[in-house]
Image: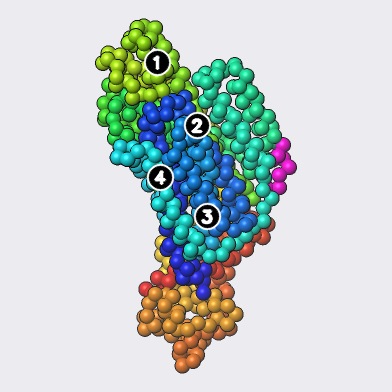
Amino acid sequence: MGREAGARGRGIGLILTALLLGMLLGALDQTIVSTALPTIVSEFGGLNHLSWVVTAYMLASTASTPLWGKLGDQYGRKPLYVTAIVVFLLGSVLCGLSWNMFSLIGFRALQGLGGGGLMALGMGIVADVVSPRERGRYQGYFGGVFGVASVTGPLLGGFFVDTLSWRWVFYVNLPIGAVALAVIVAVLQGKGEQTRHRIDYAGTFALGGAAVCLVLGTTWGGTEYSWDSPVVLGLFAGAVLLLFGWWLAERRAAEPVLPLHLFGNSVFTICGLIAFVIGFAMFGALTYLAVYFQVVEGVSPTLSGLSLLPMTAGTLTMSILSGHLITRTGRYKVWPVLGTGITTLALALCSRLDVGTGVLERSAYLLLLGAGLGCVMQVLIIAVQNTSPYRDLGAATSGNTFFRSIGGSFGVAAFGAIFSNRLAAGMAELLRQGRLPAGTDPAGLQENSALIKRLPPESAEAVLGSYADAIQTVFVYATPVAAVAFAASWFLREVPLRTATRDAGMGESMGAPTARTSKAELELALARLLYHDRDARALYSRLALHAGADLEAGSVWALCRLASEGPEGSIGAAELAARARTTREHGRPYIDALVSRGLVERRARGERLAITPAGRDLAERIFLVRRMAMDHLVADWQPELHPELAELLERLCRESLGADADSRVFAG
């Protein structure tokens, strides 16, 4: 029995539902907290640390992703996935129980550690239980989860704040995660294929530590400490030392987390820069636009989530559209040029947001910003995979998503530092001008925006103006950063697209960190191609003709299916019909054609079917034709030089026509 049939017998639907729920949790917690942040700050204070509620999660999930992925390959994904869910749920409970901003930030890091495992291991488990042909379909489901999370995250966060409490932003994970955990423990069997790794712990921790030091220095500089303070200078010096340590570690590592030679590929380097800026703009904007809506505009958290919908709608629409057009045309350079240009313009327009900006105007700005981000997201993975040799395919893909996630961390931190500095200066200026009532504490107004409502109307208006000015300044500084990516995109080298890399999964395009091997990346790409074979009947007939036989597609399906039944090549007639999801009467003409040509014989009074030597020979020729076509798809990766790639192609070839073939061909 094929892998898909066996997995279905163990409850494949339940397993995939649990994995989708886990992926939803990991993706949702990147954005759901954004609309809750103003309320959290009002309760805890600590506006200067607001960015770390987002950044702690993103840094922890990004840094841990490669470790989860390789540990799952090495020790089995089920126990690691269960551990990731438990860590994530524990972090969620503790986030909901937080008593101040620092405890919340620490627990968000713990939650992010689990979230990295949810996103890194989910697709690996799918590969363990689902056939390659079906994997392309399920990957689309996972991509849809990221799309849904990007749209609903801010909206759900606002809804929970308004109807329950900001703590329910984290508590909502518990019932969903508990269901996923129970299903995985009860239904998922075995450990799947295991691969030994020499894990680059030194490189992982050095690179993650350098990112933390840089983000901390950026966050604290000019707020907690002056830019020339020993703390800030020490953090930047520590980042430099850790980056040097990472460089040394990568030179010696057997499996480096981010191989140095990747930077010799100009496409990888430029795409990494663009990915960094896209993450910077997307997550930074989401975080501080929520502050603008709730404080400056005075809308509820739920309405602030609704106000962000134009941005997420633009991102989703253009990401899908650009992906389809790249697949059809094979041209991709225009999209990062167009996308970074639109993003730069949109950020400049967002710097005009103030107290009096109308709904239509701000919605147009956000729609434009989302469209710009969406134009770029889909192309980066495609471009990187298209120019990477086979040995670098996994590392290059994960490297690009790493830069986007780190960019998001820096974006939130940098936006936060700029916002806090500008707001503090604005409050000090209002106090100096006497526009605040006597005895007003400017720091208190900055830490808790709810106090603004207690001010006289003139003073409240002045304070809201300072908030608006601080948010405008954020976008003023973000604009030249995006312009750097726009300039870099013109230098992106366009290489004719390989067929196997014309489509990137929505999960990757929407910002999911990845941690797959080169073999897993290519298997996923080929799975998408197998799933998108539009006319399976024509494919089977064409393969038979090239193999020297004139057979209907249903007969070819049955022959290949019998050839996949081990050395005997025998199966019950009723069982074959059941696997084809049809009746024996419907499939009889296809079998009769094979019997009449001596390719199959009936045994046990017609109750069993067995392939003959002539049928075996024809099936092998059909497999060979299919294999030659698949070899052509990946010829640039030289499968003859990579035994594991050759083995993968042979397995996919046989499974896609035999054990895991599309039964609709036979069912008609």
Helix, strand or loop for disc 3:
helix
Q: Position of residue 165 (x, y in %)?
A: 35, 38
Q: Is 437 on the left-hand or right-hand side of 190?
A: left
Residue that label 4 marks: 171
Q: Which residue is mark 3?
A: 82
On screen, residue 204 above or below 487: below
Residue 442 bears which disc, if any? 1
Circle 3 residues within 10 Å: few <14, some 14–19, many ≥20: some
Q: Residue most toward the right?
A: 252
Using the image as rendered, state which of residue 435 and residue 468 is in the foreground. 435
Q: Give the camera-side residue of 191 and 604.
A: 191
In space, the residues marked 1 and 2 are separated at their CA atoms by 22 Å
Counting from the top left corner in percent of width and height, residue 447 is at: 41, 23
Magenta-colored span: 248-255
Q: What's the residue at 50%, 90% (across, down)?
A: 603
Residue 561 placed where, x, y %?
50, 75
Q: In front: mark 4 or mark 3?
A: 4
Residue visible at 40% across and 19% down in the picture? 444
Element type at mark 2: helix
Q: Residues within 10 Å of mark 2 (few under 14, many from 20)?
A: some
Mark 3 and mark 4 in contact (Cβ < 8 Å)?
no
Residue 85 drawn in magenta: no
**Residue at which label 2 appears:** 102
Q: Is residue 400 above or below residue 223?
A: below
Residue type at numbered disc 4: Tyr
Kind of residue sitting beneath label 2:
Phe
